[in-house]
Amino acid sequence: IDLLAFNDHMHDTAADSQTPRKRARMLERCGISGEAFDRLVESVMARAGEVPASVERLAQAARSADVPMLSHDDKTPEMRRAYRAMGVSVAEFPVNEDTAREAAAHDDFIVFGAPNVVRGGSHTGWTRASDMIAKGLCSILASDYYYPAQLLAAFRLAADGILPLPQAWALISAAPANAAGLADRGVIAEGQRADIVMVDAGVALRPRVVAVVTKGRLVHLADG
């Protein structure tokens, strides 16, 4: 295991199960009947009291093995402090500015989604990533399930005057590598892995990957 993230959506799941539209979507994803879904949610929620001790046990194991840890959707500064006390140094998607500021004040890594930058806001109505970046409250942009978004986000930040391209690119390269403990990559420098993406940025906000080099070997070359 190279990275461990603590991610508990069960309270949201239980609440969403009472909303017909969201419930229908979850049932479709799970592929089980409504009755079976209700039983599953009830059985998991019944064990909620066991979660804090399990988190502490897993965090201790990760610390012993030098595995970097992330917390997900931190809702309050207190929650971020609690995770930090367990050695969890990466705050993934803090849901408000106060929590992001708590993380930044202690040099925690702060993750937001690159699609949030590309589309100009969160699809859930939460924190606007570009605002957090402008305030120095974001150090990493994750793909968040849409992998082209990282490339697009870096150039969007530069075009919008929020960050110069080198600093924007660090959000998707150097900082993630650092947070994950990958000391041999993330920057182009002597002694590092030669992982290089060559980009044609001739058309504004339409960066195009021309070639990809991995460990010094050409692994992708675009037509034309």
Image (spheres, helix red, strand yellow):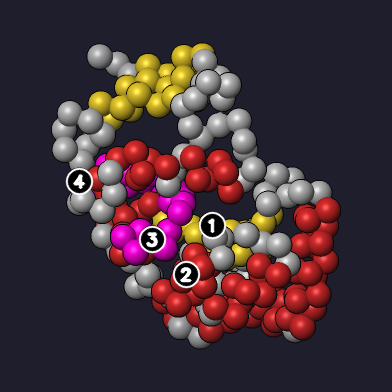
Q: Foreground residue, 101 or 92?
A: 101
- Looking at the rendered structure, the kind of residue marked 4 is Ala
Mark with earlier residue (3, 1): 1
**Callout 1: SS:** strand
Picture coordinates of residue 121, whole percent (x, y):
30, 64
**Callout 3: SS:** loop
| Cβ atoms at labels 2 and 4 below 8 Å apart | no
Q: Residue at x 83, y 57 (%)?
A: 61
The range drawn in magenta is 133-156
**Callout 2: SS:** helix
Query: Which quarter of the rendering shows the C terminus?
Result: top left
| Cβ atoms at labels 3 and 1 below 8 Å apart | no
Q: CA distance from mark 1 to mark 4?
A: 24 Å
Name the residue tied to disc 2.
100
Residue 136: numbered disc: 3
Q: Residue at x 42, y 42 (%)?
A: 170
Rendered view: 211 above or below 116 = above
Mark with earlier residue (2, 1): 2
Along the horizontal axis of the image, is 135 left or right of 22?
left
Name the residue tied to disc 1.
109
- In this rendering, the count of numbered labels is 4
Q: CA distance from mark 2 to mark 4?
A: 25 Å
Query: Which quarter of the rendering shows the N terminus?
Result: top right
- Looking at the rendered structure, the kind of residue marked 1 is Phe
Residue 159: numbered disc: 4
